[in-house]
């Protein structure tokens, strides 16, 4: 029923599109597995949203394909070396706050426009800061992080001075300012900030061209089904080859492959497409017809946990779950060993990765022993404590066949050590929307984090970033993890601008992560790009500035 329902939605959405547009030489149709809960740049943090944003909106600063900081909208990346960033005193700092901070000057390029012809100005940067630091705006996972930018002073139409309330090595990377179309969004925000996440034009008027400043604007959108892009007439960068790009959502990855083979879609991107096992099988069968590009990425597949759950609040139970799961066998069976077992959230592609981090080999007897030490007793094949069975809810994205296979594999292995698992999956837009953002998961939640080079995991691991009703559900610490030692390490890392000195701190952080297990590591993922032979110019990045951020370089080969 699920497969049929997904296919029906696909066929219905196709009927809404122009057949001639899909088959035209200047058009491209992309198939992805998820549809974003929102398109707003400051609300939510799903891969699907940022993949679409790569086509339609550019930030001031980001990472390029070579993992180097680059300017999208600014003239020059601010650094201490070029004088556009400097350490300054904070004479008005309150007790407990840093006595020093960072001033950073950002100057926008000339001839930047929104899709309705309105110039992009420094006021759009300042307005983004106003929205992104408002506790009234619901669903902003980076609220606590962005509030480190204590103010933005508009110097002129193209220049802002940004003041950070501490010394941090991420001053020009994680704290890069974004932009919002002030001319469209400010009246809505000012009218009712608490309702802004519902009233924003990114929700109510998604095809308004003034919302976008990238090479493409959104011409048509149908929730959960497709987004159709058209070239932006006010884009002053390199003109894109494709006049129209349609991004169709097909949540069932088997149906995604079927649509590619039938010609209903042209291309499946690695960021939101097939899993490695599916790509390997596809390559064997259809590699002569398509280019299959499989490469490692900064993607960390893991199990987020719910630490409010009395079972999972005991670290011995978390450790028992890893000892009771043969992750090496899992990756061998599903991925031919091509996705290595993970130790922590830090990826082997990152220069800060420590290969000597503690590792959990498969040891079911060790798992049983840890559960015994935690007060559990095996009764009729089930671990019991205080009359309650060790039973855990296990969630992931519905329709993702590989994740469902991982669930079934884990369920069977944990049953052998007396742990009962109940699978409860949801559509991606629900799962990555209210369920995780509002910490509604009850046990285990499987998904992947995408990271940037040497990205500080503060929003995921620091206790200040636990989402709650009181903070507007900001932050990405969905587990509710709170450890003073981890907080201290993150604070020290953040304040250390010397890259060599940070290495020892990164090693300590990874060691603590592996022993305290704020999440359960599964494996480091690869991305699988399935191209038609005629598509050229796509450059996978491996980090969270996805290949779509250079869509103007894509073309149809002659």
Image (tube, rainbow, N blue to C red):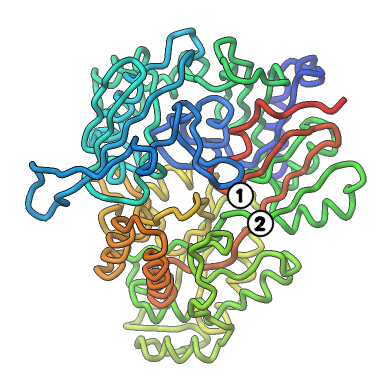
Q: Say whether residue 468 is left or right of residue 34.
A: left
Q: Nearer the viewer, residue 499 or 480?
A: 499
Q: Say whether residue 504 is left or right of residue 398.
A: left
Instruction: Give the mark nearer the N terminus: 1 vs 2.
Output: 2
- Seen at 30% across and 54% down, the residue is 466
* Residue at numbered disc 2: 296
* Residue at numbered disc 1: 542
- Quadrant of the snapshot with the N terminus: top right
Q: Residues within 10 Å of mark 1 (few under 14, many from 20)?
A: many
Q: Marks 2 and 1: in contact by CB < 8 Å? A: yes
Q: Nearer the viewer, residue 8 or 14?
A: 14
Percent coordinates x, y for residue 352 in the rendering: 48, 63
Residue 91: quadrant of the picture: top left
Q: Say whether residue 331 is left or right of residue 143.
A: right
Q: CA distance from mark 1 to mark 2?
A: 7 Å
Q: Nearer the viewer, residue 469 or 543?
A: 543
- Quadrant of the snapshot with the C terminus: top right
Q: Say whether residue 159 is left or right of residue 239.
A: left
Q: Residues within 10 Å of mark 2 (few under 14, many from 20)?
A: many
> How many numbered marks appear?
2
Residue 113 in view here: no
Percent coordinates x, y for residue 217 in the rendering: 56, 18
Q: Secondary structure at mark 2?
A: strand
- Seen at 89% across and 52% down, the residue is 285
Q: Is residue 16 above or below residue 79?
A: above
């Amino acid at each position: 029923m699920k497969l049929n329902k997904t296919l029906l939605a696909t066929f219905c959405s196709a009927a809404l599109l122009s057949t001639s547009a899909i088959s035209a030489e200047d058009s491209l149709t992309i198939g992805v597995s998820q549809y974003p809960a929102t398109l707003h740049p400051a609300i939510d943090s799903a891969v699907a949203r940022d993949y679409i944003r790569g086509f339609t909106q550019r930030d001031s600063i980001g990472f390029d394909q070579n993992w180097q900081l680059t300017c999208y909208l600014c003239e020059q990346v601010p650094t201490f070396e070029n004088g556009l960033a400097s350490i300054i005193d904070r004479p008005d700092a309150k007790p407990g706050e840093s006595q020093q901070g960072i001033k950073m000057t950002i100057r926008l390029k000339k001839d930047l426009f929104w899709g309705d012809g309105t110039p992009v100005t420094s006021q759009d940067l300042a307005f983004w800061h106003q929205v992104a630091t408002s506790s009234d705006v619901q669903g902003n996972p980076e609220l606590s992080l962005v509030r480190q930018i204590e103010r933005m002073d508009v110097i002129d139409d193209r220049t802002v001075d940004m003041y950070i309330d501490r010394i941090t090595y991420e001053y020009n990377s994680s704290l890069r300012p974004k932009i919002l179309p002030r001319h469209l969004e400010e009246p809505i925000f000012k009218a009712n900030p608490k309702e802004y996440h519902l009233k924003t034009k990114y929700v109510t008027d998604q095809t308004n061209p003034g919302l976008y400043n990238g090479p493409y604007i959104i011409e048509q959108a149908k929730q959960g089904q497709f987004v159709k892009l058209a070239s932006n007439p006010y884009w002053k960068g390199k003109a894109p080859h494709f006049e129209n790009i349609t991004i169709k959502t097909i949540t069932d990855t088997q149906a995604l492959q079927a649509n590619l083979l039938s010609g209903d879609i042209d291309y499946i991107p690695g960021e939101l497409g097939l899993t490695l096992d599916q790509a390997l099988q596809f390559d064997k069968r259809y590699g002569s017809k398509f280019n299959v590009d499989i490469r490692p990425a900064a993607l960390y597949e893991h199990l987020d946990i719910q630490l409010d759950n009395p079972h999972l609040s005991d670290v011995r139970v978390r450790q028992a779950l890893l000892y009771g799961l043969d992750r090496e066998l899992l990756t061998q069976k599903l991925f031919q060993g091509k996705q290595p077992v993970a130790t922590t959230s830090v990826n082997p592609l990152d220069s800060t990765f420590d290969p000597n981090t503690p590792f959990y080999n498969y040891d079911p007897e060790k798992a049983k022993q840890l559960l015994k030490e935690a007060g559990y007793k095996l009764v009729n094949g089930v671990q019991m404590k205080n009359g309650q069975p060790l039973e855990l809810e296990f969630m992931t994205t519905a329709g993702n066949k590989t994740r469902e296979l991982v669930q079934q594999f884990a369920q069977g292995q944990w049953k052998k050590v007396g742990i009962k698992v109940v699978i409860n999956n949801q559509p991606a837009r629900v799962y990555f929307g209210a369920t995780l953002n509002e910490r509604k998961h009850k046990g285990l939640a499987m998904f992947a984090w995408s990271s940037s080079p040497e990205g500080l995991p503060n929003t995921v691991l620091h206790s200040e970033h636990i989402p709650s009703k009181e903070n507007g559900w900001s932050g990405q610490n969905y587990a509710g993890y709170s450890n003073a030692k981890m907080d201290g390490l993150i604070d020290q890392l953040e304040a250390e601008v010397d890259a060599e000195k940070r290495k020892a701190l990164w090693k300590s952080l990874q060691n603590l992560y592996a022993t305290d297990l704020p999440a359960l590591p599964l494996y480091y993922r690869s991305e699988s790009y399935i191209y038609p032979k005629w598509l050229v110019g796509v450059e996978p990045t491996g980090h969270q500035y996805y290949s779509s951020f250079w869509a103007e370089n894509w073309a149809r080969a002659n």
